[in-house]
Amino acid sequence: MKPSIFGYQAPASIEEAISILAGDPDAVVLAGGQTLLPAMNFRAANPSTLVDIQHVADLRGIEVGTEIIVVKAMTRHREFELDAAVARVNPLVAEVMQHVAHVPIRNRGTVVGSLCHADPSAEMPLLLVLLGGSVIAQGPSGRREIAAEDFFQSFLTTARERDEIITEARFPVLPKAAGWAFDEVTRRHGDYAIAGVGCVLSLDDRGRASRVQLAACGIADTPVRLRDAENVLTGTVLDASDLDAAVAASTAAVTQPDEMHVSQTYRRRALGTLIRRMVTTAAQRATQMEIA
Amino acid sequence: MARTMRAAIPDRSADPEVDVSMTVNGEAVSRTVSVRMLLSDFLRHELGLTGTHVGCEHGVCGCCTVLIDGRAGRSCLTLAVQANGYDIRTIESVAAADGTLHPVQQAFKECHGLQCGYCTPGMVMNIVARFEEPGKLDLSDEGIRDLLSGNLCRCTGYLNIIAAVRRAAELLGRA
Protein backbone atom coordinates (compact mmCIF):
# COMPACT_ATOMS: atom_id res chain seq x y z
CA MET A 1 0.00 0.00 0.00
CA LYS A 2 1.63 3.17 -1.18
CA PRO A 3 -0.94 5.93 -0.54
CA SER A 4 -1.50 7.35 2.93
CA ILE A 5 -4.80 6.68 4.71
CA PHE A 6 -7.95 8.14 3.16
CA GLY A 7 -11.70 7.58 3.23
CA TYR A 8 -13.68 6.36 0.25
CA GLN A 9 -17.15 7.30 -1.00
CA ALA A 10 -18.89 6.00 -4.11
CA PRO A 11 -21.92 8.27 -4.63
CA ALA A 12 -24.66 7.29 -7.07
CA SER A 13 -25.64 10.85 -8.06
CA ILE A 14 -23.94 14.13 -8.95
CA GLU A 15 -25.74 15.92 -6.11
CA GLU A 16 -24.50 13.38 -3.57
CA ALA A 17 -20.94 13.75 -4.88
CA ILE A 18 -21.13 17.55 -4.64
CA SER A 19 -22.43 17.44 -1.07
CA ILE A 20 -19.48 15.23 -0.03
CA LEU A 21 -17.05 17.70 -1.65
CA ALA A 22 -18.84 20.67 -0.04
CA GLY A 23 -18.63 19.05 3.41
CA ASP A 24 -14.94 18.13 3.30
CA PRO A 25 -12.38 20.63 2.00
CA ASP A 26 -9.75 17.90 1.49
CA ALA A 27 -11.98 15.48 -0.44
CA VAL A 28 -10.94 14.89 -4.04
CA VAL A 29 -12.84 13.52 -7.05
CA LEU A 30 -11.54 10.18 -8.37
CA ALA A 31 -12.40 9.43 -12.01
CA GLY A 32 -9.88 7.28 -13.92
CA GLY A 33 -7.10 7.92 -11.41
CA GLN A 34 -4.27 7.83 -13.95
CA THR A 35 -2.81 11.08 -12.62
CA LEU A 36 -4.22 11.13 -9.10
CA LEU A 37 -3.10 7.62 -8.12
CA PRO A 38 0.56 8.08 -9.13
CA ALA A 39 0.53 11.32 -7.11
CA MET A 40 -0.99 9.45 -4.15
CA ASN A 41 1.47 6.55 -4.52
CA PHE A 42 4.26 9.15 -4.20
CA ARG A 43 2.30 10.74 -1.34
CA ALA A 44 2.48 14.00 -3.26
CA ALA A 45 -1.32 14.06 -2.98
CA ASN A 46 -2.94 13.16 0.35
CA PRO A 47 -6.71 13.59 0.03
CA SER A 48 -8.87 13.00 3.12
CA THR A 49 -11.55 11.26 1.06
CA LEU A 50 -11.78 10.01 -2.50
CA VAL A 51 -15.13 10.60 -4.16
CA ASP A 52 -15.26 7.83 -6.78
CA ILE A 53 -17.67 9.06 -9.48
CA GLN A 54 -17.57 5.93 -11.68
CA HIS A 55 -20.98 4.76 -10.43
CA VAL A 56 -22.80 8.00 -11.30
CA ALA A 57 -24.79 7.02 -14.40
CA ASP A 58 -25.31 10.67 -15.45
CA LEU A 59 -21.56 11.12 -15.82
CA ARG A 60 -21.06 8.44 -18.48
CA GLY A 61 -21.05 8.59 -22.26
CA ILE A 62 -20.53 10.81 -25.29
CA GLU A 63 -23.27 12.78 -27.06
CA VAL A 64 -22.52 13.91 -30.60
CA GLY A 65 -24.66 16.87 -31.64
CA THR A 66 -24.62 18.96 -34.81
CA GLU A 67 -22.33 21.58 -33.30
CA ILE A 68 -20.99 20.19 -30.03
CA ILE A 69 -19.61 16.85 -28.83
CA VAL A 70 -20.49 16.43 -25.14
CA VAL A 71 -17.98 14.27 -23.28
CA LYS A 72 -19.22 13.28 -19.82
CA ALA A 73 -16.87 13.18 -16.86
CA MET A 74 -16.33 9.39 -16.73
CA THR A 75 -15.60 9.03 -20.46
CA ARG A 76 -12.22 7.34 -20.90
CA HIS A 77 -9.69 8.65 -23.40
CA ARG A 78 -9.96 5.43 -25.38
CA GLU A 79 -13.76 5.75 -25.76
CA PHE A 80 -13.37 9.29 -27.16
CA GLU A 81 -10.56 8.09 -29.45
CA LEU A 82 -12.48 5.15 -30.96
CA ASP A 83 -15.99 6.68 -31.18
CA ALA A 84 -17.02 6.47 -34.85
CA ALA A 85 -19.55 9.32 -34.58
CA VAL A 86 -16.88 11.58 -33.06
CA ALA A 87 -14.44 10.69 -35.86
CA ARG A 88 -17.03 11.71 -38.49
CA VAL A 89 -17.56 15.21 -37.12
CA ASN A 90 -14.12 15.83 -35.62
CA PRO A 91 -11.28 13.71 -37.06
CA LEU A 92 -8.78 15.82 -35.10
CA VAL A 93 -9.73 13.99 -31.88
CA ALA A 94 -8.29 10.63 -32.96
CA GLU A 95 -5.15 12.30 -34.32
CA VAL A 96 -4.50 14.09 -31.01
CA MET A 97 -5.28 10.97 -28.98
CA GLN A 98 -2.40 9.01 -30.56
CA HIS A 99 -0.09 11.21 -28.50
CA VAL A 100 -1.81 10.76 -25.13
CA ALA A 101 0.32 8.36 -23.03
CA HIS A 102 -0.23 4.69 -24.02
CA VAL A 103 -3.29 2.53 -24.67
CA PRO A 104 -3.39 0.99 -21.14
CA ILE A 105 -3.40 4.51 -19.67
CA ARG A 106 -5.98 5.73 -22.21
CA ASN A 107 -8.19 2.74 -21.31
CA ARG A 108 -8.47 4.04 -17.73
CA GLY A 109 -7.81 7.79 -17.78
CA THR A 110 -10.66 10.20 -18.49
CA VAL A 111 -10.81 13.18 -20.84
CA VAL A 112 -12.36 15.45 -18.21
CA GLY A 113 -9.86 14.27 -15.57
CA SER A 114 -7.04 15.37 -17.85
CA LEU A 115 -8.73 18.76 -18.35
CA CYS A 116 -9.12 19.21 -14.58
CA HIS A 117 -5.47 18.27 -13.97
CA ALA A 118 -4.58 21.09 -16.39
CA ASP A 119 -1.02 20.13 -17.19
CA PRO A 120 0.02 22.86 -19.66
CA SER A 121 1.92 20.35 -21.81
CA ALA A 122 -0.97 17.86 -22.03
CA GLU A 123 -3.00 17.32 -25.18
CA MET A 124 -6.63 17.40 -23.96
CA PRO A 125 -6.44 20.98 -22.58
CA LEU A 126 -4.87 22.08 -25.88
CA LEU A 127 -7.65 20.43 -27.87
CA LEU A 128 -10.35 22.20 -25.86
CA VAL A 129 -8.61 25.59 -26.21
CA LEU A 130 -7.90 25.09 -29.93
CA LEU A 131 -11.54 24.26 -30.69
CA GLY A 132 -12.91 27.01 -28.46
CA GLY A 133 -14.80 24.52 -26.30
CA SER A 134 -15.99 24.76 -22.72
CA VAL A 135 -16.71 22.76 -19.57
CA ILE A 136 -19.77 22.57 -17.34
CA ALA A 137 -19.04 22.99 -13.62
CA GLN A 138 -21.73 21.89 -11.17
CA GLY A 139 -21.60 22.88 -7.50
CA PRO A 140 -23.90 23.51 -4.54
CA SER A 141 -25.19 26.70 -6.18
CA GLY A 142 -25.90 25.19 -9.60
CA ARG A 143 -24.32 24.75 -13.01
CA ARG A 144 -22.14 27.15 -14.95
CA GLU A 145 -20.38 26.97 -18.29
CA ILE A 146 -16.71 28.00 -18.38
CA ALA A 147 -14.99 28.75 -21.70
CA ALA A 148 -11.75 26.80 -22.24
CA GLU A 149 -9.51 29.86 -22.15
CA ASP A 150 -11.06 31.00 -18.86
CA PHE A 151 -10.91 27.50 -17.37
CA PHE A 152 -7.13 27.03 -17.64
CA GLN A 153 -5.67 29.67 -15.32
CA SER A 154 -2.14 28.53 -14.61
CA PHE A 155 0.06 25.46 -14.14
CA LEU A 156 -2.26 22.71 -12.75
CA THR A 157 -4.79 25.41 -11.85
CA THR A 158 -8.30 25.79 -13.23
CA ALA A 159 -11.35 27.96 -12.56
CA ARG A 160 -13.11 25.00 -10.92
CA GLU A 161 -14.09 25.67 -7.31
CA ARG A 162 -13.18 22.85 -4.98
CA ASP A 163 -16.82 21.92 -4.29
CA GLU A 164 -17.59 21.79 -8.01
CA ILE A 165 -17.50 18.79 -10.32
CA ILE A 166 -16.78 19.22 -14.01
CA THR A 167 -19.69 17.14 -15.25
CA GLU A 168 -18.86 17.41 -18.95
CA ALA A 169 -16.58 18.93 -21.55
CA ARG A 170 -18.01 20.42 -24.74
CA PHE A 171 -15.83 20.05 -27.85
CA PRO A 172 -17.07 21.84 -31.00
CA VAL A 173 -17.26 19.77 -34.21
CA LEU A 174 -15.00 20.91 -37.07
CA PRO A 175 -16.46 23.35 -39.61
CA LYS A 176 -17.48 21.70 -42.91
CA ALA A 177 -14.51 21.19 -45.27
CA ALA A 178 -12.04 22.37 -42.63
CA GLY A 179 -8.50 20.96 -42.60
CA TRP A 180 -6.91 19.88 -39.34
CA ALA A 181 -3.55 18.77 -37.94
CA PHE A 182 -1.83 18.07 -34.64
CA ASP A 183 1.71 17.01 -33.79
CA GLU A 184 4.16 17.47 -30.95
CA VAL A 185 7.83 17.21 -30.07
CA THR A 186 8.54 14.84 -27.18
CA ARG A 187 11.62 13.09 -25.84
CA ARG A 188 9.82 9.74 -26.07
CA HIS A 189 6.51 8.75 -27.67
CA GLY A 190 3.67 9.15 -25.16
CA ASP A 191 5.52 11.66 -22.98
CA TYR A 192 4.21 15.13 -22.23
CA ALA A 193 5.00 17.57 -25.04
CA ILE A 194 8.05 19.86 -25.14
CA ALA A 195 5.86 21.71 -27.62
CA GLY A 196 2.68 20.67 -29.41
CA VAL A 197 0.64 22.51 -32.04
CA GLY A 198 -2.90 21.98 -33.30
CA CYS A 199 -4.44 23.73 -36.29
CA VAL A 200 -7.93 23.91 -37.80
CA LEU A 201 -8.43 26.03 -40.90
CA SER A 202 -10.84 26.67 -43.75
CA LEU A 203 -9.99 27.89 -47.25
CA ASP A 204 -12.17 30.09 -49.47
CA ASP A 205 -12.74 29.27 -53.16
CA ARG A 206 -9.59 31.19 -54.14
CA GLY A 207 -7.44 29.10 -51.78
CA ARG A 208 -7.07 31.78 -49.14
CA ALA A 209 -7.42 30.99 -45.45
CA SER A 210 -10.85 32.24 -44.43
CA ARG A 211 -10.62 31.03 -40.85
CA VAL A 212 -7.57 29.85 -38.88
CA GLN A 213 -7.43 28.36 -35.38
CA LEU A 214 -3.99 27.68 -33.96
CA ALA A 215 -3.02 26.64 -30.42
CA ALA A 216 0.02 25.26 -28.63
CA CYS A 217 0.80 23.26 -25.50
CA GLY A 218 4.03 22.90 -23.55
CA ILE A 219 5.18 26.47 -24.08
CA ALA A 220 3.55 28.40 -21.20
CA ASP A 221 1.74 27.79 -17.91
CA THR A 222 -1.51 27.05 -19.80
CA PRO A 223 -2.33 25.86 -23.30
CA VAL A 224 -2.24 28.93 -25.54
CA ARG A 225 -4.38 30.07 -28.45
CA LEU A 226 -1.93 31.73 -30.90
CA ARG A 227 -4.21 34.59 -31.95
CA ASP A 228 -1.48 36.83 -33.35
CA ALA A 229 -0.43 34.05 -35.71
CA GLU A 230 -4.09 33.33 -36.58
CA ASN A 231 -4.56 37.00 -37.56
CA VAL A 232 -1.37 37.02 -39.62
CA LEU A 233 -2.46 33.92 -41.55
CA THR A 234 -6.13 34.78 -42.11
CA GLY A 235 -6.74 36.00 -45.67
CA THR A 236 -3.38 34.75 -46.99
CA VAL A 237 -2.55 31.88 -49.34
CA LEU A 238 -0.38 30.37 -46.55
CA ASP A 239 2.87 30.52 -48.50
CA ALA A 240 6.35 30.42 -46.96
CA SER A 241 6.48 34.13 -46.18
CA ASP A 242 3.05 33.98 -44.49
CA LEU A 243 4.26 31.06 -42.37
CA ASP A 244 7.45 32.99 -41.48
CA ALA A 245 5.30 35.89 -40.31
CA ALA A 246 3.07 33.57 -38.25
CA VAL A 247 6.10 31.99 -36.58
CA ALA A 248 7.55 35.42 -35.83
CA ALA A 249 4.21 36.45 -34.29
CA SER A 250 4.28 33.42 -31.97
CA THR A 251 7.74 33.58 -30.40
CA ALA A 252 6.58 35.74 -27.49
CA ALA A 253 3.99 33.10 -26.56
CA VAL A 254 6.80 30.82 -25.34
CA THR A 255 7.23 31.75 -21.69
CA GLN A 256 8.40 28.43 -20.18
CA PRO A 257 11.88 29.10 -18.79
CA ASP A 258 14.95 26.98 -19.56
CA GLU A 259 14.68 23.50 -18.05
CA MET A 260 17.16 20.68 -17.56
CA HIS A 261 16.50 19.05 -20.93
CA VAL A 262 15.01 21.94 -22.92
CA SER A 263 16.04 25.56 -23.29
CA GLN A 264 13.51 28.26 -24.07
CA THR A 265 15.27 28.81 -27.40
CA TYR A 266 14.82 25.16 -28.33
CA ARG A 267 11.14 25.33 -27.41
CA ARG A 268 10.72 28.40 -29.65
CA ARG A 269 12.34 26.57 -32.55
CA ALA A 270 10.19 23.48 -31.96
CA LEU A 271 7.09 25.69 -31.87
CA GLY A 272 8.06 27.43 -35.13
CA THR A 273 8.69 24.13 -36.91
CA LEU A 274 5.40 22.69 -35.69
CA ILE A 275 3.42 25.79 -36.74
CA ARG A 276 4.84 25.54 -40.27
CA ARG A 277 4.12 21.81 -40.52
CA MET A 278 0.65 21.89 -38.96
CA VAL A 279 -0.63 24.83 -41.00
CA THR A 280 0.69 23.19 -44.18
CA THR A 281 -0.86 19.81 -43.34
CA ALA A 282 -4.20 21.38 -42.39
CA ALA A 283 -4.24 23.38 -45.64
CA GLN A 284 -3.52 20.24 -47.69
CA ARG A 285 -6.36 18.42 -45.98
CA ALA A 286 -8.73 21.36 -46.49
CA THR A 287 -7.86 21.29 -50.21
CA GLN A 288 -8.53 17.54 -50.36
CA MET A 289 -11.85 18.03 -48.56
CA GLU A 290 -12.92 20.54 -51.20
CA ILE A 291 -12.00 18.21 -54.06
CA ALA A 292 -13.82 15.32 -52.35
CA MET B 1 7.26 10.23 38.76
CA ALA B 2 4.50 10.18 36.23
CA ARG B 3 5.72 10.20 32.68
CA THR B 4 4.01 12.13 29.87
CA MET B 5 0.58 10.72 29.35
CA ARG B 6 0.31 8.32 26.46
CA ALA B 7 -2.67 8.26 24.15
CA ALA B 8 -4.78 5.18 24.67
CA ILE B 9 -4.16 2.50 22.08
CA PRO B 10 -7.20 2.52 19.77
CA ASP B 11 -9.27 -0.66 19.67
CA ARG B 12 -9.45 -0.63 15.90
CA SER B 13 -7.33 0.36 12.94
CA ALA B 14 -7.46 3.93 11.68
CA ASP B 15 -7.22 2.51 8.17
CA PRO B 16 -10.76 2.32 6.76
CA GLU B 17 -11.81 -0.95 5.17
CA VAL B 18 -14.28 -1.80 2.46
CA ASP B 19 -15.86 -4.97 1.07
CA VAL B 20 -14.89 -5.74 -2.50
CA SER B 21 -16.09 -8.45 -4.84
CA MET B 22 -14.83 -9.11 -8.33
CA THR B 23 -14.21 -11.91 -10.78
CA VAL B 24 -10.56 -12.84 -11.07
CA ASN B 25 -9.56 -15.31 -13.78
CA GLY B 26 -13.15 -16.54 -13.95
CA GLU B 27 -13.52 -17.06 -10.21
CA ALA B 28 -15.67 -14.88 -7.93
CA VAL B 29 -13.67 -13.45 -5.03
CA SER B 30 -14.74 -11.32 -2.05
CA ARG B 31 -12.50 -9.71 0.53
CA THR B 32 -12.58 -6.94 3.10
CA VAL B 33 -9.57 -4.75 2.40
CA SER B 34 -8.14 -1.34 3.15
CA VAL B 35 -9.58 1.27 0.78
CA ARG B 36 -6.05 2.29 -0.09
CA MET B 37 -5.08 -1.20 -1.26
CA LEU B 38 -3.95 -1.12 -4.88
CA LEU B 39 -5.36 -3.73 -7.24
CA SER B 40 -1.78 -4.99 -7.80
CA ASP B 41 -1.37 -5.62 -4.06
CA PHE B 42 -4.85 -7.13 -3.88
CA LEU B 43 -3.96 -9.67 -6.56
CA ARG B 44 -0.56 -10.49 -5.07
CA HIS B 45 -1.14 -10.30 -1.31
CA GLU B 46 -4.81 -11.21 -0.92
CA LEU B 47 -5.12 -13.74 -3.74
CA GLY B 48 -1.54 -14.99 -4.00
CA LEU B 49 -1.45 -14.26 -7.73
CA THR B 50 2.16 -13.12 -7.81
CA GLY B 51 2.45 -13.39 -11.59
CA THR B 52 1.37 -9.75 -11.78
CA HIS B 53 4.66 -7.94 -11.20
CA VAL B 54 5.06 -4.58 -9.52
CA GLY B 55 7.82 -2.38 -10.87
CA CYS B 56 7.51 1.37 -10.51
CA GLU B 57 4.09 1.72 -8.84
CA HIS B 58 3.38 4.95 -10.69
CA GLY B 59 2.24 3.77 -14.09
CA VAL B 60 5.45 4.06 -16.09
CA CYS B 61 6.87 0.53 -16.40
CA GLY B 62 3.77 -1.49 -17.34
CA CYS B 63 4.86 -4.63 -15.40
CA CYS B 64 1.57 -4.71 -13.47
CA THR B 65 -0.69 -4.58 -16.57
CA VAL B 66 -3.80 -6.77 -16.21
CA LEU B 67 -7.09 -6.91 -18.12
CA ILE B 68 -9.88 -4.90 -16.49
CA ASP B 69 -13.17 -5.83 -18.18
CA GLY B 70 -11.12 -7.03 -21.15
CA ARG B 71 -8.99 -3.93 -21.52
CA ALA B 72 -5.35 -3.57 -20.54
CA GLY B 73 -4.88 -1.37 -17.48
CA ARG B 74 -2.32 -0.64 -14.80
CA SER B 75 -3.19 -2.54 -11.61
CA CYS B 76 -0.88 -0.19 -9.63
CA LEU B 77 -2.96 2.81 -10.77
CA THR B 78 -6.25 1.18 -9.83
CA LEU B 79 -7.50 0.75 -6.29
CA ALA B 80 -8.93 -2.66 -5.46
CA VAL B 81 -12.16 -0.88 -4.50
CA GLN B 82 -12.32 0.74 -7.95
CA ALA B 83 -12.33 -2.75 -9.46
CA ASN B 84 -15.38 -3.72 -7.37
CA GLY B 85 -17.73 -5.66 -9.64
CA TYR B 86 -15.29 -5.86 -12.52
CA ASP B 87 -13.86 -8.83 -14.42
CA ILE B 88 -10.08 -9.05 -13.90
CA ARG B 89 -7.70 -11.30 -15.81
CA THR B 90 -4.08 -11.84 -14.87
CA ILE B 91 -1.14 -13.68 -16.41
CA GLU B 92 -2.14 -16.80 -14.45
CA SER B 93 -5.20 -17.18 -16.72
CA VAL B 94 -3.32 -17.01 -20.01
CA ALA B 95 -1.86 -20.51 -20.41
CA ALA B 96 -4.28 -23.45 -20.62
CA ALA B 97 -5.04 -25.46 -17.46
CA ASP B 98 -2.77 -28.28 -18.68
CA GLY B 99 0.14 -25.84 -19.02
CA THR B 100 -0.06 -25.43 -22.81
CA LEU B 101 1.25 -21.96 -23.54
CA HIS B 102 -0.95 -19.28 -25.10
CA PRO B 103 0.25 -18.41 -28.62
CA VAL B 104 1.61 -15.09 -27.32
CA GLN B 105 3.62 -16.95 -24.65
CA GLN B 106 4.73 -19.55 -27.21
CA ALA B 107 5.92 -16.75 -29.49
CA PHE B 108 7.91 -15.14 -26.65
CA LYS B 109 9.54 -18.52 -26.01
CA GLU B 110 10.36 -19.17 -29.67
CA CYS B 111 11.71 -15.69 -30.31
CA HIS B 112 13.62 -15.38 -27.02
CA GLY B 113 11.36 -12.44 -26.17
CA LEU B 114 12.47 -12.39 -22.54
CA GLN B 115 15.67 -12.50 -20.55
CA CYS B 116 14.97 -11.96 -16.84
CA GLY B 117 11.22 -12.12 -17.43
CA TYR B 118 10.26 -9.40 -14.98
CA CYS B 119 8.41 -7.29 -17.54
CA THR B 120 6.96 -10.29 -19.40
CA PRO B 121 3.59 -10.69 -17.61
CA GLY B 122 2.71 -7.04 -18.29
CA MET B 123 3.93 -7.31 -21.89
CA VAL B 124 1.91 -10.49 -22.48
CA MET B 125 -1.30 -9.08 -20.95
CA ASN B 126 -1.02 -5.90 -23.02
CA ILE B 127 -0.41 -7.88 -26.22
CA VAL B 128 -3.20 -10.39 -25.46
CA ALA B 129 -5.63 -7.49 -24.96
CA ARG B 130 -4.72 -6.02 -28.34
CA PHE B 131 -5.03 -9.40 -30.09
CA GLU B 132 -8.50 -9.85 -28.61
CA GLU B 133 -9.68 -6.55 -30.11
CA PRO B 134 -11.40 -6.90 -33.50
CA GLY B 135 -9.94 -5.23 -36.56
CA LYS B 136 -6.66 -5.29 -38.42
CA LEU B 137 -3.43 -5.33 -36.44
CA ASP B 138 -0.65 -2.93 -37.40
CA LEU B 139 2.32 -5.31 -37.58
CA SER B 140 4.78 -2.76 -38.94
CA ASP B 141 7.80 -2.09 -36.70
CA GLU B 142 6.25 1.26 -35.84
CA GLY B 143 2.85 -0.26 -35.05
CA ILE B 144 4.33 -2.93 -32.78
CA ARG B 145 6.56 -0.38 -31.04
CA ASP B 146 3.48 1.75 -30.40
CA LEU B 147 1.69 -1.30 -28.94
CA LEU B 148 4.66 -1.96 -26.64
CA SER B 149 5.34 1.69 -25.80
CA GLY B 150 3.66 1.40 -22.40
CA ASN B 151 5.88 -1.50 -21.29
CA LEU B 152 9.52 -1.11 -20.32
CA CYS B 153 12.10 -3.93 -20.58
CA ARG B 154 15.34 -3.26 -18.72
CA CYS B 155 17.12 -6.20 -20.35
CA THR B 156 16.67 -4.21 -23.60
CA GLY B 157 15.17 -7.20 -25.34
CA TYR B 158 12.91 -5.11 -27.52
CA LEU B 159 13.95 -6.50 -30.92
CA ASN B 160 13.08 -10.02 -29.86
CA ILE B 161 9.84 -8.84 -28.29
CA ILE B 162 8.85 -7.16 -31.55
CA ALA B 163 9.64 -10.42 -33.35
CA ALA B 164 7.52 -12.28 -30.77
CA VAL B 165 4.49 -10.07 -31.48
CA ARG B 166 4.85 -10.80 -35.18
CA ARG B 167 5.22 -14.53 -34.50
CA ALA B 168 2.17 -14.48 -32.21
CA ALA B 169 0.17 -12.91 -35.04
CA GLU B 170 1.22 -15.82 -37.28
CA LEU B 171 0.30 -18.41 -34.63
CA LEU B 172 -3.10 -16.76 -34.13
CA GLY B 173 -3.78 -16.44 -37.85
CA ARG B 174 -3.76 -12.62 -37.56
CA ALA B 175 -0.65 -11.88 -39.66
Image (cartoon, coloured by chain):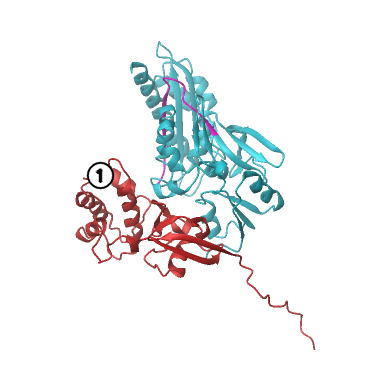
Chain colours: A cyan, B red
Give percent across and percent down for residue A3: 56, 62
Quadrant of the image containing the C terminus of chain A: top left
Give percent across and percent down for residue B25: 38, 61
Picture quadrant where residue A153 is located: top right
Please, which residue is most extreme toward the front here? B28
Relative to residue A283, is residue B92 depicted above or below? below
How many numbered marks are there? Answer: 1
Amino acid type at circle 1 is Leu
Q: Which of the pair B142/B53 is nearer the observer?
A: B53
Q: Which chain carries label 1?
A: B
User: What's drawn in magenta, residue-wise?
Assistant: A170-187
Please, which residue is most extreme toward the top here? A206
Q: Mark 1 points at which residue?
A: B139
Based on the picture, tell me whether residue A181 belongs to the magenta stretch.
Answer: yes
Q: Residue at x 43, y 47 (%)?
A: A107
Q: Which of the pair B88/A185 is nearer the observer?
A: B88
